[in-house]
Structures are given as C-alpha cells and as structure tokens.
Image (cartoon, helix red, strand yellow):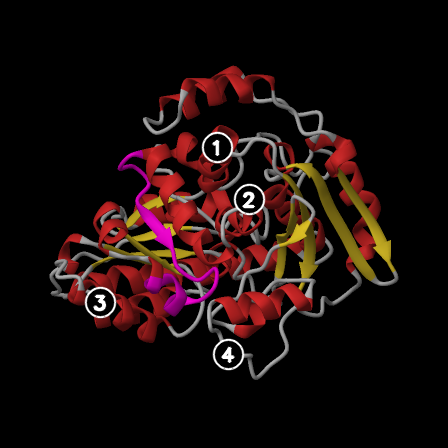
Amino acid sequence: MPNQDKPVITSLLDTDLYKFTMWQALLHRHPQTQVEYRFVCRNQPQFPLTDLLAEVNAELDALCRLPFAPDELDYIGALRFMKSDFIDFLRLFQFQRAFIEARADGDTLSIVAQGPQVHVMGFEIFVLAIVNELYFRRFDHDAAIAEGRRRLDAKIARVQALARDAKLRHPFEMFDFGVRRRFSGPWQREVVQAFAERTPEWFKGTSNVLLARDLGLVPIGTMAHEYLQTYQALGVRLRDFQKYALEDWVQEYRGDLGIALTDTVGMDAFLADFDLYFAKLFDGLRHDSGDPYTWGEKALAHYQRLRIDAHTKRFVFSDGLNVDSALALYHHFGDRVQLGFGIGTQLTNDMGLEQLNIVMKIVRANGQPVAKISDSPGKTICDDETFLAYLRQVFNIPEPTTAPEA
C-alpha cells in the first residue's frame, strides 16, 4: 500500500522537462505576463473528484512549502541548454499558495491558478499528478499493481519482439511521457526502470526530470501548447503568433531543443508558417492530435516541397499512444524519417482501471482569452467562443462537427 502520510510530490524535479524549458524562455523574454490556468476532467470519473478536495488542498499546501534542493539545482544547471540566471531564479523560487485555488463547484472539482506566468505555469503537472494519485488510492492498490505488472511485462515483450524484427532504416525509439496521468509516483518509477533495464536498445529517456536524474536517463522535452498559446496575447499580430513563438525559441536555445509542436491551431496553419527558415532551424516536429498517419504524410510532403532531406529530421508522436500504436507508426514511417514515440498514460497508468482524462490548460493571458484549436476536436480548449471564432477566421479553420471542450 502507498504511504499516505507522505506527500504525493516530494521533489520539484518530479515534473516534465518542458516545464523548465518553457519556463526559462518565458522568464527571459516575457516575465511580466499574467495568466490563468484551469483544471478540466474530460470524462466521467467513478466518483466525484470533489470527494478529494480536502486532500488536494493539503497536497497544494505541501507543494507550496517545497523548495528546490541544492543537488536538484546542480542537476538542472548541468543541462547545457539551461542558463545560470534561470538556476539562480529557481534557487529563490517557491510556489505561492495565494496563486492557486481548489474548490467544489457542485460535483465539479475546480482548480484555478492565476498570477504571473513564471510563478504559476509550474503548477500544471503537479496538480494533475496529485489529483490522479489521490483518485486511484480509492481503488484496490494490490490488485491494480498486480495487473499493471502483468501488462508491463506484455508491453516489454512486444517491444523486444517487434522492434528487434524490424529492418528499417531508422531505429525504433520510445520515451516515457507519463507524469501527468500516472497511477502513482512509485509506479511510474517502476515502469521506467523496467523499460530502461529490459529494453535499453529502444527505450531512450523520460520526460520526468527526477527519474531521468535518478535512473541515469536522458530527460526529454521541448515545448507544449501553453508556450505557443501565450503568444496569442503578447501584442503581436494574431496571424503571426506562431512565428514569433518559434523565433523566440530559436533565439533562446540556438540549436538545442529543436522539436516544434505543430497543432496549437492545427497542422495546416502550422505548416503555412513553418517556412524554409524554420524547417532548417528545427530538428523536427511533434504530433499531438489528429490522425498521425495523415499528419506524418503532410509533414513529409512539406519537407519535400522545401527540398529538405527528411532523413535528417525527426517526428515525435505523443498523442494517446500505446506500445502497439507506436510500433505500427514506426513500421509505416521508419524507412523515411527519424522517429521517436512519447507514450504517456498507457505506459504509467495501464492498470485495468478506467483512466481519468484530466488536463490543466492556460485559458487567459494578460487579461485576454487564448485557445488551442486541436486537430482532434475534443481536445480544443477555450472558454471564450467569440475569440475561438475569431481565431478560426484568422487561420481559415472550419468549424468542427462536434462541440469543443469548455
């Protein structure tokens, strides 16, 4: 059984690498930005998440007492793309409880983080990990772990068999992207360690900075939607927000962290902005919504039009993958482009229990709405229909056939 006297989060490294990379870029370039992030559960849990409210608030209290330890700062500071002034900022940093509120709206758990972006953006992954772990503590822990280990063994066996048999130009490479919706912190550690030890030819890292440090793995991650969305409210022409965001990223990292996220306003609108300049500067692209095969073919055609050899680029797939879907994509694209597969929930929370589909997304910046118009309509995020319609008009995006998420 888990130790329920110990906080869910005991280290500020227990989060995704891209939180740090986006954090540094925004601290250096737009430190004054004020934002609002909101928690949403997209599916129906087996009991109201409001039942967890007291525990969630206690966990947030504990999180806001947690500083970065000196050895943690040493690890982050040793990453070549992290700058010394950002490490100095983290040395002084502590989450402020006044910037986040968790309460019940009827049977809906409401969690809102509001304040300076460089002080609240880090809440997201911790909040999701906290809610998820508290929720799954209500189920039979021993039975879930037993089933999880059985499924873990089966996944590892499939990777060992199917990836080894492949005779494609580029190797199969997979990563753990499962912090936010994991069954628990200890279970994520067990899963990542098992893959690292039993499939080292194909398992190449984790987005979890703490596990990367502790297990001697490569920390993986570049940018998320919140980074690009923020630029919708930074005073640039809305039509140009992606170009400004990508340009700032290039100037910040100057060749490091070169995988660009493509679906903040859809793949077609992204490719319209991803000209020869950016295509040469970025090492590749990340898929996070829409049909992955269609997306991959569009990306390959784009590189071909630009006369760029796709074998020099990398596609990273990260949208609801499991081992089987990752292997299928690998067999489809592995002779044409370098590939990586970030597997999240289906790696760290495949326990025979119905998973929570929870997110915590930026909805406002500098007092105005921001939006993600996903290539998967159910993943669209915006609470302002007027702004969403305007954004669709600017980027010539048709209305979806299904209603977007609130």
Residue 300: image tag: 3
Alpha carbon separation for disc pair 4 and 2:
25 Å
User: Mark 2 or 1 closer to N-term?
Assistant: 1
151 displayed left or right of 56 = left
Circle 4: residue type: Pro
User: Mark 1 or 3 closer to N-term?
Assistant: 1
One can see residue 355 in this view:
yes
Which element carries disc 1, helix, strand or loop?
A: helix
Picture residue at 61% right of the left edge, 66% below the top: 388
Q: Is residue 257 magenta?
A: yes
Around disc 2, counting alpha carbons within 10 Å, would you say few (fewer than 14), some (14 to 19), or many (20 or more)?
some
The front one of 235 and 214 is: 235
Residue 251 locus on image (x, y percent) = 34, 35
**Magenta-tinted stretch:** 254-272
Alpha carbon separation for disc pair 4 and 1:
33 Å
Which residue is denoted by mark 1 in the rendering? 29
> Mark 3, mark 4: which one is toward the viewer?
4
Residue 164: image tag: none
Alpha carbon separation for disc pair 1 and 3:
32 Å
Q: Are marks 1 and 3 in contact (CB under 8 Å)?
A: no
User: Mark 4 or 2 closer to N-term?
Assistant: 2
Residue 234: image tag: 2
One can see residue 1 in this view:
no
User: Mark 3 or 4 closer to N-term?
Assistant: 3
> Mark 2, mark 1: which one is toward the viewer?
2
Which residue is denoted by mark 4 in the rendering? 398
User: Mark 4 or 1 closer to N-term?
Assistant: 1
Around disc 3, counting alpha carbons within 10 Å, would you say few (fewer than 14), some (14 to 19), or many (20 or more)?
many
Picture residue at 61% right of the left edge, 45% below the top: 124
Circle 1: residue type: Arg
> Mark 1, mark 3: which one is toward the viewer?
1
Q: Is residue 405 magenta?
A: no
